[in-house]
Image (tube, rainbow, N blue to C red):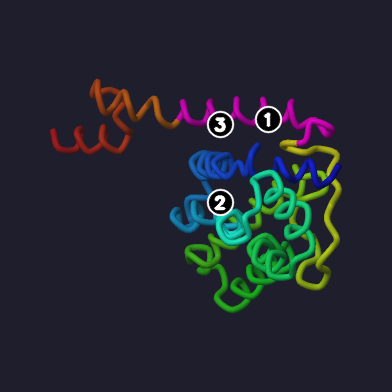
Amino acid sequence: MRTRQNTLYLLTSMQTYSHFLVTAALYRVVPSARQLSRKAVYWGSIGPDLALLSLSVGSFVYFRVFEGMQGREIFRHIYGTLFFTDPYWILLQNTLQAPILLVGALAFLWRRYGRHVVASAGFALCLSCLFHATLDILTHHNDGPLVFFPFDWTTRFYSPISYWDRNHYGDIFSSVEHALDLVILLTFVLPYLFRRFFGTGRSSSETVSTQEGS
């Protein structure tokens, strides 16, 4: 069953865009988040998924072109074997999702540079990656990040919720997730479109500048 479920892992998801949208929304609405580097926060929201995406695409091309394997067989091998057992896969996909490494990096940066480190790109990147990893740990039943990596290369948190597996409320979670994505997109995009095409919805800073100039 695990092999069949993980065959669908790439097909049904890698909802990297949801991580980006949720992180971007929090950056907009949480005042204290404005102290962080915006670019680093955004990169941190998608960074933990880039290794798995690269490994998946590269492996699929290799096994299809050079080994002559068929699509279904490739997916079974990738997500049923390599994902859980190959040391290179485990290392690359967990480095930016390891809570111990990320918390350790944040603590080191804070201790070395003090409060001013909050404005640094490195601090923002690690914090955003940690938020991404936390969401993944809570929304993966048996294929989430390794919680004790790099000291333990097998232990995962068995969440009762999976963002893709119907046996663990994946269908419900997916509906809620995409509804939230739509709300965030509309919240961010509609005001921009109105300003762009209708000249309405000017920001408060633009209004103040106009008043000061008059």
Q: Residues within 10 Å of mark 2 (few under 14, many from 20)?
A: many
Query: Element under label 1?
Result: helix
- The dominant secondary structure in magenta is helix
- 180, above or below 104, in the image: above
**Amino acid residing under circle 2:** Ser
Residue extending farthest to the front is: 68
The amino acid type, in three-letter code, at marker 1 is Ser
Q: Which residue is mark 1?
A: 174
- Highlighted magenta segment, given as a residue range: 165-187
Of 163 and 207, the residue lying toward us: 163
| Residue 54 x, y percent position in the rendering | 56, 58
Mark 1 vs mark 2: in front: 1
Between the C-alphas of marks 3 and 2, the distance is 14 Å
Residue 45 got which mark? Answer: 2
**Element under disc 3:** helix
**Amino acid type, callout 3:** Asp
Q: Is residue 203 left or right of residue 21?
A: left
Residue 202 badge: none
Q: Position of residue 79 (x, y in %)?
A: 73, 52
Where is residue 190? Give x, y as percent.
Answer: 39, 25
